[in-house]
């Protein structure tokens, strides 16, 4: 089997894994974990008061989503840079020893 056809099979498989759950739960409400947790806490204890408040509230949900995505991108960038650097260093050491 050619490499291109293997990659296409993997791509289709990933697309099915990504969109199949969304298709099954198409009428579901996708609320964030924060909203669900606050609802559960208020249902368990109506007199609950938080320990502290945020010192800065983002102006909108879009800004909050952007900051979360930026944090995830930077974190994954650092992790995968380190993995690539380590792999390159390991390969260079093997090549120098041979």
Image: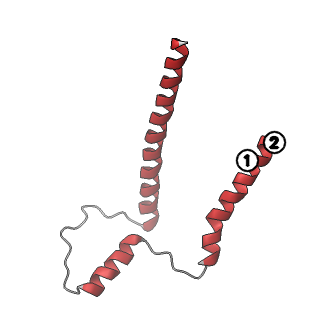
Q: How far apart are marks 1 and 2 (CA)?
A: 9 Å
Where does label 2 land, which residue? Answer: 2
Q: Where does the image place residue 60, in percent across and percent down from the top left?
A: 41, 67
Label count reads: 2
How many residues crowd around disc 1 within 10 Å: few (fewer than 14), some, or many (20 or more)? few
Q: Residue at x 24, y 61 (%)?
A: 55
How many residues crowd around disc 2 within 10 Å: few (fewer than 14), some, or many (20 or more)? few
Of labels 1 and 2, the one closer to you: 2
Q: Is mark 2 on a helix, strand or loop?
A: loop
Image height check: is 63 above or below 78?
A: below
Where does label 1 land, which residue? Answer: 7
User: Is residue 94 found left or right of 3 in the rendered image?
Assistant: left
Name which quarter of the figure residue 43 lies in: bottom left
User: Is residue 46 found left or right of 33 in the rendered image?
Assistant: left
Q: Residue at x 21, y 73 (%)?
A: 50
User: Is residue 15 found left or right of 25 in the rendered image?
Assistant: right
Name which quarter of the figure residue 45 lies in: bottom left
Q: Where does the image place residue 22, in percent across and percent down from the top left?
A: 61, 72
Q: Which residue is drawn at 49% across and 24% down?
A: 90
Q: Where does the image place residue 93, in percent across and percent down from the top left?
A: 49, 18
Q: Earlier in the sequence, mark 1 or mark 2?
A: 2
């Amino acid at each position: 089997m050619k490499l291109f056809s293997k990659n296409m099979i993997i791509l289709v498989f990933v697309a099915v894994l990504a969109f199949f759950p969304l298709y099954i739960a198409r009428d579901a409400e996708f609320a964030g974990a924060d909203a669900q947790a606050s609802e559960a806490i208020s249902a368990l204890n109506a007199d609950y008061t938080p320990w502290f408040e945020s010192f800065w509230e983002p102006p909108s949900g879009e800004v909050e989503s952007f900051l979360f995505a930026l944090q995830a991108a930077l974190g994954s960038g650092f992790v995968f840079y380190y993995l690539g650097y380590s792999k390159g260093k390991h390969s260079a050491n093997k090549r120098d020893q041979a």
